[in-house]
Amino acid sequence: MTDGEDIRVTESREPDMSDTSETAAAGGSPRTTALDATHRALGATMTDFAGWDMPLRYGSERDEHVAVRTRAGLFDLSHMGEITVEGPQAGELLDYALVGNLSALKTGRARYTMICDGQGGILDDLIVYRTGEQRYMVVANAANAQVVLDALHERGTGFDATVRDDRDAYALIAVQGPEAAGILKALTDADLDGLKYYAGLPGTVAGREALIARTGYTGEDGFELFVSPADAVAVWEALTEAGTPVGLVPCGLSCRDTLRLEAGMPLYGHELSTRTTPFDAGLGRIVKFEKTTNDGSFVGREPLEAAAARAEEAPPRKLVGLIAEGRRVPRAGYAVVSAADGSVIGEVTSGAPSPTLGKPIAIAYVDAAHAEPGTEGVAVDIRGKHEPYEVVALPFYKRQR
Amino acid sequence: MSNPEQLRYSKEHEWLSAAEDGVSTVGITAHAADALGDVVFVQLPEAGESVTAGEPCGELESTKSVSDLYAPVSGEITEINQDVVDDPALVNSAPFEGGWLFKVRISDEPEGLLSAEEYTAFASGS
């Protein structure tokens, strides 16, 4: 059950995590992960997310959020879409298909990157792991996995490399939070101390084979474990057993959203879309014009060069953080307005009550003239009332290292 | 959590206590609070304000959504629960007790308010 759908007091006027932009177009009942029975036994509230039946929360989403910030949380992220690109020209293929310089990535390392359309619009944001000299794993958002797969197939024509749909080959379990390394250390043969942020290596977890990656979407230290679906329950249970004494709790997608929001991380369908380029989203640094493979050619290069120049000279809007002075919560789609005259100066892309700050927060695209941190007179139109907001630089939260 | 026998319920998931001197207490049910998730902000009608059965009279904000609060009966608000305004988590932790929302002097009540048994059946089917 999701909020707002089957209960009148909760007649939501807001899209929630099951809104159409993230729900697979295909009809029929949602897919379940290898951990479905585990979630139900834990009493999870489930939600349809991008065509998958996923845990929204197990108890209080605020408590789950706080657990990840202070102890550890355990997530089922098996909806994410894995695609393997393999062959002598796998790196060149990805250099052409994506905005990053993946041929330069060292084996065992990972990169945050994007795939754009021919106009420079963002088709998806991705994490790419180099898992071998001639092998990469591309991890796409569930809602975009088919689009990414189709684009890689199409753009891969003529390269000596294969593109393989590995969505069914993996379950993905994340353990995130300051206690994550200690919990995992007891269960793995891998050298976690030698595993840097944005690195991944093969190993075992609780005796099962896994790709162990030091990545996440929470703003905390943590790991993402790609395992066979057949091993998912055993790995989940081993992590639960090892982690419970130090405060690990199972966590749903609801707290994952507030965690990434505090950490200032974009979410496709909110901050990112085909109508935005990486430069519009303040992420121009991930576009590697300097790459030399394929004579520097890659899909979207020319429009992205224009977008880079525009962002340098006269950016129309900038992505900023907003912190509420009051208690009403800004939601995606709400207008950002000038408190002086009520004119629209931007739009909220994500908003939520922040458990860490104890106040509502939002990420918003705001006209450049109002986007400097500390700009006075910025408000959000919350159902007709203009509530004052403070403009801040992202992220809202950065962990102490 | 079971729905207390002595209360009556609306299909909008509010509960209503038996009237004392014509005044009833109103809150939302445990089922509704659970469906909302953590409530972070409540906006209630003001004391003295008139409310109409079936019409929105406030808002509840949770992590993922904002929801209208519906008046289960018509009447005049006599008191609001300042504790729940200050600490909205009471709606989740004690929906039938400390998380009550307001008191209303009933001028008219709609037909079709549910008994605990009827509401339990209704909520489990929803």
Image: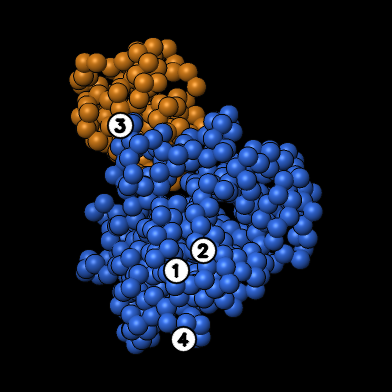
Chain colours: A blue, B orange
Q: Quadrant of the C terminus of chain A?
A: bottom right
Label 4 and label 2: CA atoms lie apart by: 21 Å
* Residue drawn at x 21%, y 15% as measured from the top left: B111
| Residue at 51%, 85% in the rendered image | A292
Q: Is residue B108 left or right of residue B22?
A: left
Please name which of the two marks, 3 or 2, marks the residue nearer to the observer. 2
Amino acid type indicated by mark 2: Thr
Residue A159 appearing in the image: yes
Type of residue at label 4? Asp
Q: Earlier in the sequence, mark 3 or mark 1?
A: 3
User: Which residue is label 2 attached to?
Assistant: A162
The residue that mark 3 highlights is A8
Which residue in the structure is indicated by mark 1?
A156
Say yes or no: labels 1 and 4 on the same chain.
yes
Whether tag 1 and tag 2 are in contact, CB under 8 A, the answer is yes
Q: Measure the C-alpha gap from mark 3 to mark 4.
A: 59 Å
Q: Secondary structure at mark 2?
A: strand
Q: Are the residues tagged 1 and 4 within 8 Å (C-beta)?
A: no
